Image (cartoon, rainbow, N blue to C red):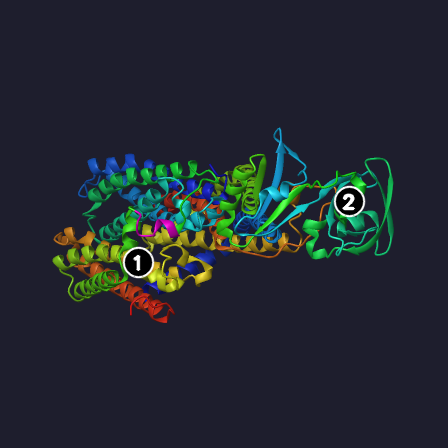
Amino acid sequence: MLFQPAIIALLLASGLAVLMLAVAAPFAVQVIRRWDIASGSELQLALERRTYLFSTLLGFVFAAQLGALLLFVFTADRLSVMFVGAMCAVGTLNVNGYGFAALLTQIGVFFLAAMWLTINHADSQARDYPLVRLKYGLLLVLLPLLAGSFWLELQYFRGLKANVITSCCGSLFSGEAKTIAGEASGLPAQPAILLFYAALTAAVAAALVHWRHAGRASGYVLAATSGGAFVAAITGILSFVSLYIYEHPHHHCPFCILKPEYDYQGYALYLPLFVATAAGLGAGALQPFARIPSLATSLPRLSARLAGVAAVGFSIFSVLASYFVLASRLRLLE
Amino acid sequence: MHPWLEKQRHLIDFTLAALARRKAKNIGLLAAYALLVFVLASLALFTQALRKEAGFVLAASPEVIVQRMVAGRHDLIPPGYLDKIGRLRGVQKKEGRLWGYYYDPVVSANYTFMARPAEEVASGSIMLGATLARARGLQLGNLISFRSYAGKLFSFKVAALLSPDSELLAADLVLLSEEDFRAFFDYPAGHYTDIALSVANPQEVRNIAAKLANALPDSRPILREEVLRTYQSIFDWREGIVLTVLAGAILAFALLAWDKASGLSAEEKREIGILKAIGWETGDVIRMKLWEGVLVSLSAFLLGFVAAYIHVFYFGAAIFKPVLQGWAVLYPSFTLVPAVDGLQIATLAFFTIFPYSAAVLVPIWRAATTDPDAVMR
């Protein structure tokens, strides 16, 4: 393993997060079994008090998760000098099989955590905490995921030994590769552009519809289109947006756009994309509870607001991506 | 203003006033916090600057150095070896280098002697590194004698001092002509110490190294990127070791934060009780306490980081120098180029703000859920 401060920090953060959730788990079981809002017993009072602790704690864990995701990509990028043939984060993540698995799991955990926080917020708006059992049930589901993500990260860092020959971004994203990333970047520019704009337009449209009238069906559609738009957006970044930013017809790397050489343009793209996707998925996650009487007024308002955020985020992302493409001196399509 | 922002603004106002009411307690915590950030930030800034310096220094070194090995030990390059390498596609220049070490009993230090072509250094004269010249009190035009390993005395005239910009590399360097070098060390004719190759295309370096290893199985090609990587690992490792040593301090700080946050005075408890009695909810109290944490963290981080920056780049990191940079009798004096980067700050935040927040969460909750009647009675 490499003895590197950023790696120690990452392992510390995700280890502590798993530990905190593990400490919360017995309490979650207790809530699921003993929660009774109508009761005035001492146990119920104690449980109600403790829900405050655990919502705060989870908010903290998930905020840390988001920070850790960024730090993970940063670290991978910085470590690339340690490996022969690795030129950026892609090469470093490819040093062993756990790298990309760890990254994808972290992104997954981030979105699930965002959905959990949305449900938690909706629940705290109602007087009778109608979703409390479900919330803590989901918490128990998140725990193994978080632990798995920690395990993958640990395996990845343990397997890092400086000097292993890896493929650099050029050879990984060169189209012949059979990985998901390889296939996506192998998409020729024209269909990728069509897919990109179709998916983003669909997501913005669904978000606007849901924003105007927060119905149940439109909420589910919004979640589905948001997920689709996220995949299409990443595919688009891999297959044409990054090419235009680098002004190089074969450089498909999704991480180099985060670097200072390219004016940190990647942050301007990824930030609205992640926020919009999280908001869209959150709005969808709320829909199953729209019929609960105590949530009937607050929930549509919350989900409409999330739809607004999603619409704005996806629009900013599309406008920026189009701007980067138009401002580039590279011409892919005649 | 948006009602949510308005609310947060008032919470911050209230929190600041509350912090100011208990100055002594909070300043103590702030000082400990800032000290921790200072120590960790000094460490991070200093190693980062050293890494950068190593990168600058190596940028101008040859891409590949070829050594000959005999029984696993570095040996001289025999005559004809250079020709055996032949013409390698991609190699712009190859030259045999002559260098060696000389122990000077006067300052009890090793010098590096290196031969340069006659156009650069005339026979009978030498060029000196600045640190060495300082140690021996030499100036331009002075004469200096060295007693060679064979026992003969050689006198040289100091023809030039090397520029102080290159001090990190040239601290103990003595440049002399090839003829003088061979005479001084009794170096066998036609032999060289090693071979330096310049390669134009960085992506070809590994192929060339592979070809060399094939053509000359007794050679050891050393690549510049390998040297650079080794330096990076050494500094990473040193930083990691110091960090592990400091882990105790981080833990101690987390305990202190926990203790400070849970040891609420009777007055503070009463205050929370009154707040709740006049209509604050548990969530509001938690939010207020979180703001308190954010304010304390940010000010401590800023204070500690600025102090560390001054410590490293204006005072040369006096505290960590002995551990991190290594030592030598003729140690070059060099100034670090100030550099701050995002990864360092993010890592630092994870080492300080994260443990602090984790430590104060439970005490905050405990304070926020106290019953008003229990504390006001």
Query: Which quadrant would residue A196 be assigned to in this image?
Result: bottom left
Q: Which residues are magenta?
A: A170-177
Q: Residues within 10 Å of mark 1 (few under 14, many from 20)?
A: many
Q: Is residue A213 left or right of residue B214?
A: left
Give the amino acid at mark 2.
Answer: Phe
Q: Is residue A174 left or right of residue A43?
A: right
Tell me if residue A171 is in the magenta stretch. yes
Give the amino acid at mark 1.
Answer: Ser
Name the residue rendered at 68%, 50% in the picture: B168
- Residue located beneath label 2 in the image: B181
Name the residue rendered at 26%, 56% in the picture: A187
The furthest residue to the top: B71
Query: Which quadrant would residue B100 be assigned to in this image?
Result: top right
The C terminus of chain A appears in which quarter of the rendering? bottom left
Q: What subunit carries mark 2?
A: B
Q: For the residues carrying marks 1 and 2, which lies nearer the camera in this image?
A: 2
Mark sitting on residue A27: none
- Residue located beneath label 1 in the image: A239
Q: What subunit carries mark 1?
A: A
Q: Is residue A67 visible?
A: no
| Residue in the foreground of this view, choosing between B164 and B17 | B164
Q: Where residue A231 appears, x then y in whole percent?
A: 25, 54
Q: Where residue B295 appears, x then y in whole percent?
A: 46, 55
Q: Residues within 10 Å of mark 2 (few under 14, many from 20)?
A: many
Name the residue rendered at 57%, 42% in the picture: B222
Q: CA distance from mark 1 to mark 2?
A: 59 Å
Check if mark 1's residue and mark 2's residue have beta carbons within 8 Å.
Answer: no
Q: Where residue A211 appears, x then y in whole percent?
A: 19, 65
Tell me if residue B363 is in the magenta stretch. no
SS class, disc 2:
helix
